[in-house]
Image: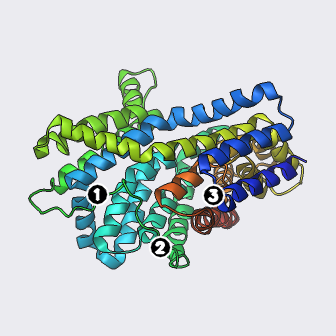
Amino acid sequence: MPLIILAIGILILFFLIVRVKLNSFLALLLVAGLVGLAEGMPVAKLIPTIEKGLGGTLGGLAIVVSFGAVLGKLMAESGGAQRIATTLINVFGRQNVKWAVSLTGFIVGIALFYEIGFVLLIPLVFTIAAEAKIPLLEVGIPMAAALSVTHGFLPPHPGPTAIAVIYNADIGMTLIYGAVIAVPTAIVAGPLFYNFTKDINPTIPEGLYNPKIFTDEEMPSFGVSVFTALVPVVLMAASAIAKLVLDQASTAAVVLEFLGQPDMALTISVAIALYTFGLARGKKMDEIMITVKDAILAIAMILLIVGAGGALKQILIDSGVGTYIGTLVADAGLAPLVLAWLVAAVIRTACGSATVAALTAGGIAAPICAATGANPELMVLATGAGSLIFSPPNDPGFWLFKEFFGLTVKETMRTWCALETIIAVMGLIGVLVLNAFVA
């Protein structure tokens, strides 16, 4: 019954958005409430659960997305994004710039959660597409695919690292195996997969890109532009590395952990950007603050929609749907690697969150891993791959991709959902191939 209720809820959501043309934020909240009631959740718990999901999602993303938008807007309006874009285009050529974006997403994604890396890179994607006069998704899909692959496969990214702890896997070996799978997966799900979506050609959403063409003298240098853009990446990467190699009680580890928190890292980067992309370019503070305000206004509705996706996710978690489905699949008697992948995939489809799916599946499959002697590093990768599949509408990442790229629900399913499924399936195939050699 929980599966039937979930399926009906998703169909109602599609109907409200596609046919009724209801605002996505309102549709998500309405469906979250209906699904919660249908799953037997007490009426008294319904609103607190929606608030918990919305608040929990925005609590972790509000500052990051807002400051990421501010950083991107400052970078765009100072000419910094154009400087980076033109340099990449000149080095790689217009036809190969999608490979440069894919590599950038791969590097950035190792340190950052998907949503954070996405918000940081989206201004660069917009600018490259405009400068090179190429379709937006030609660079958008490779960027998103690279970020998602690192989210599922590569420590020290927080997701795979947390799963490695659950399975008691060696993080170094997980990274090596993960890299073997991640590189071809990012290529197939990114630059190659784009060739099947060429008929989808969205325009850059208004307010998120500055169409002004800067002269060479007006733009900051490439070094300053890259430094400012990568400050949060460097801080978060340093924090991740510190957790692996330093005594956690040491002063250096404590300081790096503090500076590497996404909120803090973005705060520092915005403070630097106010100078490098603002004051140093001869702008006055009141002029810079207009840019800051415009950036926040441009992503306000996106934030609410992402938060509402989190509310639906929380309804499904608190009503027990995820645990129910995970246990159901675990009783199927499959091989451990396939089981871990399938449990994560089903929970991902039911609950939306890749992180929740991975950690829940890890908890369910960990005893099976220990009992069967399955390779723990490959179990990490199988779980991570399964947790990425499909990205249903109850995943905040679905709405992040849809809204920033200005897509319809159908177009989002053909692009974002399809590339996530490619990553999940290729991850499973890669794990099974590796298992034949390392088991």
Q: Nearer the viewer, mark 2 or mark 3?
A: 3
Kindly identify the amino acid type of the residue bearing the numbered disc 2.
Asn
Position of residue 82 in the picture relative to residue 419 (left or right): left
Question: How far separated are the C-alphas under marks 2 and 1?
Answer: 19 Å
Among numbered discs 1 and 3, the one appearing first in the sequence: 3
**Most foreground residue, 56 or 158:** 56
Residue 1: x, y in percent?
Answer: 91, 48
Question: Who's the residue at 53% across and 69% down the image?
Answer: 184
Is label 2 in contact with label 3 (beta carbons under 8 Å)? Answer: no
- Identify residue for label 2: 201
Rendered position, 128 above or below 377: below
Question: How far separated are the C-alphas under marks 2 and 3?
Answer: 21 Å
Task: Tell me the element at label 1.
Answer: loop
Tell me if residue 362 can be seen. no
The coloring applied to the image is rainbow
Question: Who's the residue at 51% across and 59% down the image?
Answer: 179
Q: How many numbered discs?
A: 3
Screen quadrant of the C terminus: bottom right
Kindly identify the amino acid type of the residue bearing the numbered disc 3.
Lys
Alpha-carbon neighbours of circle 2 within 10 Å: few (<14), some, or many (≥20)?
some
Residue 169: x, y in percent?
Answer: 63, 44
**Hey, which quadrant is residue 139 in on the image?**
bottom left
Alpha-carbon neighbours of circle 3 within 10 Å: few (<14), some, or many (≥20)?
few
Position of residue 340 in the picture relative to residue 248 (left or right): right
- Identify residue for label 1: 210
- Identify residue for label 3: 21
Residue 437: x, y in percent?
Answer: 66, 65
Among numbered discs 2 and 3, the one appearing first in the sequence: 3
